Image: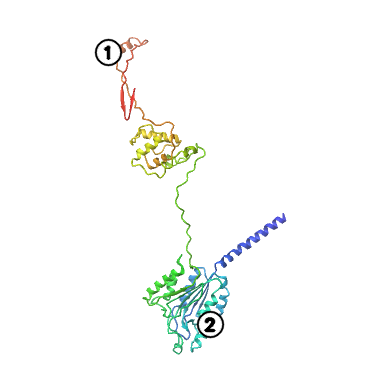
Amino acid sequence: MFDRLSHFLRLCLFGILALALLPAAAEAAGRKLALVVGNQAYTVLPGLNTPVEDAQGVSNALRNLGFEVTLLTDVGPAVFQAVLGTFAAQVDEADTVLFFYAGHAFQKDGVNHLVPVNARLADAKALDTETWRLDDIAKALKGKTNQLLLFVDACRDNPLPEAVRAVAEAGGLAQFDGGAGTFVAFATAPGQVAWDKTEGAVNSPFTAALLAHIAKPGQNISDLMIAVRNDVETATGGKQTPWEQSSLREQFFFVPPVEVAPVAEEVLPEFEVVADQNTALAPPGGIAVIGQGVGDDQLASLESDTRSLNAPLPENLALGVQTELDRIGCYGMPVDGDWGNGSRRAMAAYYDAKKVAPGEMEPSEAVYRALLAEPEKTCNKPAVAVKSATKTTPKATTKKSTTKKAAATTTKKKPAVVAPVKKKPTCKFMVIAVVCS
């Protein structure tokens, strides 16, 4: 008894541990990381209006989309390098890594540089030592198998002091190639300057458009950028055009499309034969369906080409129903399309043969198609026209009647015997048959 209890407890413990590890395993399988930076309050260089709001908006949107987000605002080089090192140590565990930057940036010798808030950039050497190279950031964030997504909302104007502007490019950022598995999107085309803010807006035109479309279900990242590009060009009057470059190995969706189960092709229902011929369910209206009270041998005798359930309706539905009633042995009168009491008696005979409650008595599509499915000799005895009752008036003369009355008055014991009158056969025409009596 004790051994069984011990074994049971061990099984419970293993089950609890397995359940506890499942969420962690699922999280690792589809882990998404994001490093978001917004630099706005520059100490020496000209300040900007929206990068902090831009970074906070993107950070919130990505969290809602399942990303683990690290947010930095108005950050200097020391803090950024420390956070970048810690963040980069996790990228091999993630499927997707995203980097978003809003702030000052410039290009020098074809390399893009991002600018910390405390950079002075007093001389040419400082352009390299006081900034972050986008190439170095991408290299640190690129794991072994993950997808790297870069969004750079920068180059809103030329931030460089007059003393060093001759060393760097006049404006705009350079094209960027992050290698296989990398996607990069810039707020504007290479060599062009982006807008910081439009009148009355909280975010830059690029970030505002990105936030408006990023959570659309089933939209891949290329379609996302088309929507962003259209919005930005509209907001800036065509003066700013976002640009992207992709070398992703597969499509990426911020919100994957919903998988819809394939719709099965419509097929005709398969009818089953009831094993017990006496067991049949009557559908509404009393119309029987295929297989109700019909044996295997009877069903086998049906001709599929003439008894098809999809056969077109006859132009004269009454004539068609009479024809089917006649075929299955329920109708014993001429088939003429004239629906009357005789046809209704044939319907009653059909319901009686099927052992179901009488239902529809008039010709209809449901009646016609039900009869199509019935085998011959469904009815053992067809319905025929019923002879009308006739009254025969005795042809005794007045004289004989008077004599008969007198005789009855004279004696009650022996009534007068009246000789039977021999009748001649008379013929009367009844609807569609001649009845002789």
Of 348 and 183, nearer the camera is 183
The answer to which image quadrant residue 25 occupies is bottom right
Q: Residues within 10 Å of mark 1 (few under 14, many from 20)?
A: few
Whether residue 295 appears in this view of the structure is no
Residue designated by label 1: 399
Q: Residue at x 35, y 38 (%)?
A: 319
Which numbered disc flags the more N-terminal residue, 2 or 1?
Answer: 2
Which is in the foreground here, disc 2 or disc 1? 2
Determine whether 191 is above or below 349 in the image: below
Query: Which secondary structure, mark 2?
Result: helix
Q: Residue at x 46, y 38 (%)?
A: 301
Determine whether 436 is above or below 130 in the image: above
CA distance for labels 2 and 1: 145 Å
Q: Residue at x 35, y 9 (%)?
A: 411
Residue designated by label 2: 77
Quadrant placement of the C terminus: top left
Asked whether, in this view, residue 38 is left or right of residue 339, the answer is right
* Residue 296 point in image, percent of width and height: 49, 39
* Residue 330 point in image, percent of width and height: 41, 34
Instruction: Check if mark 2's residue and mark 1's residue have beta carbons within 8 Å.
Output: no
